[in-house]
Image: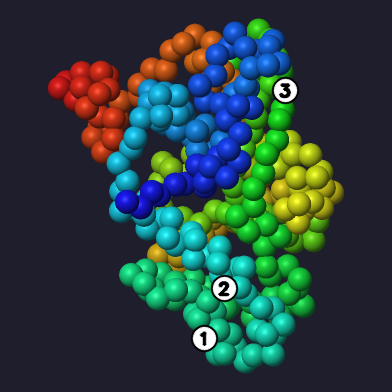
Amino acid sequence: MVVIMNNDEKYEHLLNVMDEFTYKWNPEWVDDPTKPILKITKSSLGQFGWCPTKYEFSYIQRLPQDQTEAMRKGTIIHNAREDFFNDFDIKKAETMTNEEVVNYCSTLFPIDEYYDTYLDMATFEAQRFIESKEDDKLDEYLPVANEGKFDAEITFHANTSKRFPLQRDYKIHLQGIIDRIFREGNNLIPMELKTGPWKENSSKYTSMRKEMAFYKYLIEACDDTVLIKNGIDPAWKVSHWSWYFPTSDFFYVEAVKKRTMTAVTDAIAKLLKAYEDGEFPAKYFYKSCTHCSFFGICDAAQEDSWL
């Protein structure tokens, strides 16, 4: 059986430090240094935002979920893109003609059922390399962090979120793997690969921005040693974030949005409040809930689906 894990799950498996931090967290442990602290990742915080009940099933109870074809596709293509940047030889490509660069990029991807997507990515990366060479910026072509692993411990203060005030300070562990981080001068630009199609005016854009804001929050919270290990000068700051949709041949970059950064602290405060209250209420929405692995055991879904 093939087990497919997202970035956060892979990192958790690699670290194997569940004794230090956990999703099965108890608010009564706040003042006890012998107890594990709450762990938050981009995926877990996003899952809580979509549906607190699904968060409880997935992260606290650790119930198994169905592995969809979209999840399998995403894992395979993400791995192929990671390998591409690990194998790309700047000096070798620098001596090539433009046509040879395109061919070279295509050879760095595997031949499997997603080869058409790989060809789109090869063309995109070849054009980006050609433009970097013309602009004399080949030193910025490769990402400074390729599937970079980040850990940070923060103290979340009661006054961090004005909308969701808490009564005390909480020590929290932030964790995650970031697809790619590129550098432009002293600016950092995290980039997420999306294997689904780009859709205009999608409601997912808000959650996508929150994911990137979480990455910025995580990077800023890291110790200098963690940043340096990931090839990042601590003086560099995240100024933009971006997404790449190869199946739609679409690349989008935008400046960091302050209101989205505020939304991250609000989301963390909401999550902490849910643990404090011991309540993870469901958010029923028929378009997504009917495809949820937990549809059959979710009381809210069963009740609302009959309305």
| Side of 219 relative to 106 (left or right) | right
Q: In which quarter of the image is the C terminus?
A: top left
In the picture shown, does residue 62 fall above or below 166?
below
Query: Is residue 202 in sight in this rendering?
Result: yes
Q: Mark 2 points at which residue?
A: 125
Residue at image location 38% in from the left, 17% down from the top: 281
In the picture shown, does residue 83 fall above or below 252?
below
Mark 2 secondary-structure assignment: helix
Judging depth in this view, the residue of 230 and 46 nearest the camera is: 230
Distance between mark 1 and mark 2 Cα atoms: 11 Å
Provide residue 278's location: percent of width, then percent of height: 46, 11
Provide residue 29's location: percent of width, then percent of height: 62, 12
Mark 3 secondary-structure assignment: strand
Residue at image location 58% in from the left, 77% down from the top: 127
Q: Name the residue under label 1.
A: 103
Q: Mark 3 points at which residue?
A: 155
Among all residues in the image, which is located at the extreme left? 306
In the picture shown, does residue 195 fall above or below 114?
above
Mark 1 secondary-structure assignment: helix
Label located before the other in sequence (1 or 2)? 1
Q: Neighbour class for label 2 at 10 Å: few (<14), some, many (≥20)?
A: some
Distance between mark 1 and mark 3 Cα atoms: 49 Å
Q: Which label number is shown at residue 278?
A: none
Residue at image location 56% in from the left, 70% down from the top: 84
Front tag of 1 and 2: 1
Q: Are marks 1 and 3 in contact (CB under 8 Å)?
A: no
- Which amino acid, by three-letter code, is at mark 2? Glu
Label located before the other in sequence (3 or 2)? 2
Label located before the other in sequence (1 or 3)? 1
Distance between mark 3 and mark 2 Cα atoms: 40 Å
Provide residue 285's location: percent of width, then percent of height: 29, 30
